[in-house]
Amino acid sequence: MSITAQYEAVKRSLPEGVTLVAVSKTHPAEMIRELYDAGQRIFGENRPQELKEKYDLLPHDIRWHMIGHLQTNKVKYIAPFVEMIHSVDSDRLLAVIEKEAAKNDRMIDVLFEIHVADEETKSGWEPDELRAYLDSGAWRSYTHIRYRGVMTVATQTDDEAQIRREFTTVRDLLAELRDRYFDATFDTLSMGMTHDYPIAIECGATMVRIGSKIFGARDYGQTAR
Ligand SMILES: *Cc1c(COP(=O)(O)O)cnc(C)c1O
């Protein structure tokens, strides 16, 4: 199937109200252009320089989402145009996003990445760690940041019950944090990838991040991962 046909199939599988982030990392600008022509506007990338290069090559009404771990010294590459950063995992990162957004005189939407998976390597806040951070109030001084919700990556496992537990934990956390610290605009639940997005949707995801099911397998080539 062509990527457009794959894309249409994925779109049809999403209920109304679930936003698709087409994850285009490692794929060339021409493939993104093809989906753009088919109507897709939100694309997700995980490397700041790659994101910036694609931004320069493609129509500027694309809404770029940063979904991967972000180093503070790379925020400057994407701050002029990025719509949403899904992977906020520290106050240090928020402070730099604030500074760079202010420099560009714009607002940047962020999600707190929540760590619920088994893997030690996955980044993000433990729920208690995030509660303590939000209690500290430091985040309230960042006036160029809009706090929009939470994001997670579930454990890579065939155990559906475990994936469901993890997604449910994050869904409940979103509601709790919205009530305790934020308002109705803290409403984005970014969870679900190619292999687990139907479960994520059952658990309340409002945004899914889908790459391989649309674009096919990624070839990391000479890159380090
Ligand atoms: C690569 C990536 C995705 C998309 O993964 P697929 O399995 O290709 O759908 C989603 N979220 C994050 C954080 C990613 O890095």
Image (cartoon, rainbow, N blue to C red):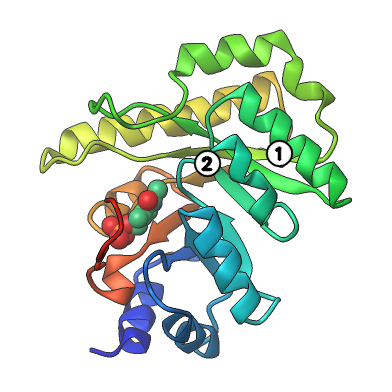
Measuring from the top left, give residue 163's x and y in whole percent: 24, 37
Q: Which residue is rendered at x = 66% and y = 82% of the image? A: 59
Measuring from the top left, give residue 9's x and y in whole percent: 32, 79
What is the CA distance from the residue labelled 2 to the residue labelled 1? 10 Å
Quadrant of ligand 1: it is bottom left
Q: Which residue lies furthest to the right in this view?
A: 105
Q: Quadrant of the N terminus?
A: bottom left
Would you say the residues marked 2 and 1 are in contact, meaning their CB atoms lie under 8 Å apart?
A: no
Amino acid at pointer 1:
Ile
Relative to 102, say whether 38 is above or below. below
Q: Which residue is rendered at x = 40% and y = 30% of the image? A: 123
Give the image quarter of residue 114: top left
List the residue tagged with mark 2.
70
List the residue tagged with mark 1.
97
Measuring from the top left, give residue 18's x and y in whole percent: 49, 59
Amino acid at pointer 2:
Leu
Relative to 19, say whether 103 is above or below. above
User: Which residue is at the front of the view, 198 or 34?
Assistant: 34
Check disc 1 and report its element: helix, strand or loop: helix
